Amino acid sequence: MVKQISKEMLDSIINIVRRSPQGASTDDILNELTMPLSRRSLQRYLALLVERNLLTVSGQHLLDIP
């Protein structure tokens, strides 16, 4: 069974990255999320956001797309 993608979680991740002008690491995002999420699930969400061109990766950090 495939889990549904939570729009609320995607929005939360994007907002965390937007508040970090230098970019946000996965640890930064996990520490700021108010909803529990495993590191692996976060990685899946991040991959989806990058695939949809909503975030970009620069070195070890995720950046908002202007």
Image (tube, rainbow, N blue to C red):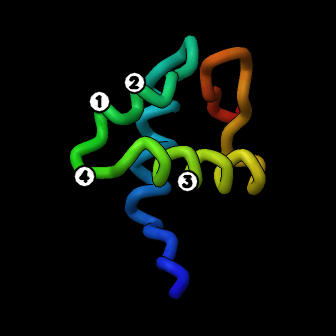
Crowd around label 1: few <14 · some 14–19 · many ≥20 (10 Å): few
* Residue underneath mark 3: 45
Q: Residue at x 33, y 51 (%)?
A: 37
Distance Cα–Cα, label 4 vs label 3: 14 Å
Closer to the chain start, of discs 4 and 3, is: 4
- In the image, residue 5 sits, relative to residue 30, either above or below, namely below
* Residue underneath mark 1: 31
Q: Looking at the rendering, which quadrant does residue 6 occupy?
A: bottom left
Distance Cα–Cα, label 1 vs label 4: 10 Å
Residues at marks 1 and 4 touching, judged by CB atoms closer than 8 Å? no
Q: Residue at x 40, y 57 (%)?
A: 9
Crowd around label 3: few <14 · some 14–19 · many ≥20 (10 Å): some
* Residue underneath mark 4: 35
Q: Position of residue 59 (x, y in %)?
A: 71, 15
Amino acid carrying mark 1 in the image: Asn
Closer to the chain start, of discs 3 and 1, is: 1
Is 59 situated left or right of 5 in this image?
A: right
Residues at marks 1 and 2 touching, judged by CB atoms closer than 8 Å? yes
Amino acid carrying mark 3 in the image: Tyr
Q: Residue at x 65, y 51 (%)?
A: 49
Element class at badge 3: helix
